[in-house]
Image (tube, rainbow, N blue to C red):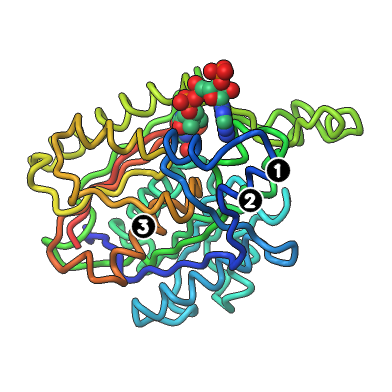
C-alpha cells in the first residue's frame, strides 16, 4: 500500500472585494452585527466573466507548480463543488480540458462545505491502491451566484474562492494518517437550494419565488456543527493514537468564527494553533479548508513534519476530519 500526501497547493480568489459596509447598502444589516456574529469583515465576488472552472485552472496550475508536476502527470481530477459552471457536463471536464491534462478519471463531487475533505479521501484511496499516482483535488465555489442579495441571513456569509491540492505518494511519516467522513440527510433542508433540480425544475414561478437561492436555518445548524466538528476531530485523533495537544495546526471549515472558537475550546487547543481567514474571505464552502491550507503552506506557517487536523461541516449535513503529517 502506498502512503498518500499533499505535494502542492494553490488558490485563486476573484479580485472584487465586498465589505460589510458594501452590504449595509444592500440589505438591513451592519458591520457590527456581521463582525460580532460571524467574524467576517469582507469576502470576494467573482466577475460575471469568471467561472468556477476558470478559477480552478488557475489554482490547479499553482498547485502543480509547487508539486513540480505537469498537468500531463495527473491520473485523476476531482472537483468538489456545489456551484459548477453548468449542470452538465461536470466542471472537472472543463478543468481537464483547460489544463491540457490527459483523458483521466475526472468528476465532480457534491458534499458542500465538507467536499474538499471528501474528495481528498477519495483521492487517497486511488493513490493507496496504486490505481493512480497523482490526483488533483479542487475545492471550488462561486456561491455569490446562488446568493439572494435580499436575504440578510445568507448574503453576508458566503464568498467566492477556489483552492487546489495535488495528492500523490509520500514517504512515511508524512501523509494522510486518518480520515472519517459522514452525511446525515435528516437536516437536508436546513441548508439548501429548493429549485433547479429534478424535484422542482426551473420555471417562471420558481424564479419569482426566489427558490434558486440558498436558504439556511443557521441557528439550528450552529449547534450541530459545533458538536459534530468536535466529535469527528476527536475520533480521527484517537484512530491515529494522538491527542489534541499533539497538533501543530487545526484548520476548521470557516463557517463562523464563533463555531471555530467553540470547537477550539472544546478540544482544549491554544488559540495560536488554530488558523482562521474568515475575516478576509467569509465562508467559501468547499474552498474554505484548502484556501487556509494554501495560505499556511505559502506563508511558512506549515513546516515539514507538522501535524495538521482539518475538520469540516456543511449542507447535507456533511462533516468529516482528515489528519495529516506534512
Ligand atoms: O458552512 C455551512 C455550515 N454553516 C453553518 O453551520 C452556519 C451556522 N450558523 C451560523 O453561523 C449562525 O447561526 C448565523 C451567522 C447564520 C446567524 O447567527 P445567529 O447568532 O445564529 O443569529 P440568528 O439566526 O439567531 O438571528 C438573530 C437575529 C435575528 O433577529 P431577531 O429575530 O432576533 O429579531 C435575525 O433576523 O439576527 C437577525 N439577523 C441579522 N441582523 C443583521 C440575521 N442576519 C442578520 C444580518 N444582519 N445579516
Rendered-image quadrant of the C terminus? bottom left
Report the front residue among 219 and 78. 219
Report if the CB atoms under discs 3 and 2 are less than 8 Å apart. no
In this picture, is 225 found above or below 20? above
Report if the CB atoms under discs 1 and 2 are less than 8 Å apart. yes
| Disc sitting over residue 22 in the figure | 2
Q: Is 165 positioned to the left or the right of 7 in the image?
A: right
In this picture, is 65 found above or below 324? below
Give the residue number, with chain letter if any, for mark 3.
292
Residue at point 30%, 41% (across, down): 321
Secondary-structure class at tag 2: helix
Report if the CB atoms under discs 1 and 3 are less than 8 Å apart. no
Give the residue number, with chain letter if any, for mark 1.
26
Residue 142 visible (yes or no): yes
Residue 283 picture location, percent across and down:
49, 45
Q: CA distance from mark 1 to mark 2?
A: 7 Å
Rendered-image quadrant of the N terminus? bottom left
Residue 220 picture location, percent across and down:
47, 19
Secondary-structure class at tag 3: helix
Residue 86 picture location, percent across and down:
73, 53
Residue 217 visible (yes or no): no
Report the front residue among 105 and 174. 174
Report the front residue among 50 and 61. 50
In this picture, is 28 found above or below 85? above
Amino acid at each position: 500500500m502506498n502512503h498518500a500526501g499533499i505535494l502542492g497547493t494553490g488558490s485563486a480568489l476573484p479580485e472584487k472585494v465586498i465589505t460589510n459596509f458594501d452590504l449595509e447598502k444592500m440589505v438591513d444589516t451592519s458591520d457590527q452585527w456581521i463582525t460580532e456574529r460571524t467574524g467576517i469583515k469582507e469576502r470576494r465576488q467573482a466577475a460575471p466573466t469568471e467561472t468556477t472552472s476558470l478559477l480552478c485552472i488557475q489554482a490547479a496550475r499553482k498547485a502543480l507548480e509547487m508539486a513540480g508536476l505537469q498537468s500531463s502527470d495527473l491520473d485523476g481530477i476531482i472537483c468538489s463543488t456545489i456551484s459548477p459552471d453548468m449542470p452538465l457536463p461536470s466542471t472537472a471536464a472543463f478543468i481537464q480540458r483547460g489544463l491540457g491534462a490527459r483523458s483521466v478519471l475526472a468528476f465532480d463531487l457534491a458534499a458542500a462545505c465538507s467536499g474538499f475533505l471528501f474528495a481528498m479521501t477519495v483521492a487517497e484511496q486511488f493513490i493507496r491502491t496504486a490505481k493512480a499516482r497523482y490526483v488533483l483535488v479542487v475545492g471550488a465555489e462561486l456561491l455569490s451566484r446562488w446568493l439572494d442579495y435580499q436575504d440578510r441571513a445568507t448574503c453576508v456569509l458566503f464568498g467566492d474562492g477556489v483552492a487546489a491540492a495535488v495528492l500523490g505518494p509520500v514517504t512515511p511519516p508524512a501523509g494522510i494518517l486518518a480520515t472519517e467522513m459522514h452525511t446525515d440527510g435528516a437536516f437536508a433542508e436546513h441548508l439548501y437550494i429548493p429549485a433547479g433540480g429534478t424535484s422542482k425544475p426551473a420555471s417562471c414561478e420558481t424564479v419569482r419565488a426566489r427558490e434558486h437561492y440558498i436558504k439556511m436555518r443557521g441557528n439550528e445548524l450552529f449547534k450541530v456543527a459545533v458538536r459534530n466538528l468536535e466529535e469527528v476531530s476527536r475520533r480521527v485523533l484517537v484512530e491515529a493514537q494522538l491527542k489534541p495537544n499533539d497538533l501543530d495546526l487545526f484548520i476548521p471549515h470557516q463557517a463562523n468564527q464563533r463555531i471555530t472558537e467553540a470547537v477550539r475550546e472544546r478540544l482544549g487547543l491554544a488559540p495560536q494553533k488554530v488558523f482562521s481567514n474568515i475575516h478576509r474571505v467569509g465562508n467559501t464552502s468547499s474552498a474554505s479548508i484548502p484556501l487556509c491550507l494554501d495560505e499556511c503552506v505559502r506563508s511558512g506557517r506549515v513546516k515539514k513534519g507538522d501535524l495538521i487536523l482539518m475538520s469540516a461541516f456543511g449542507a447535507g449535513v456533511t462533516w468529516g476530519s482528515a489528519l495529516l503529517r506534512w
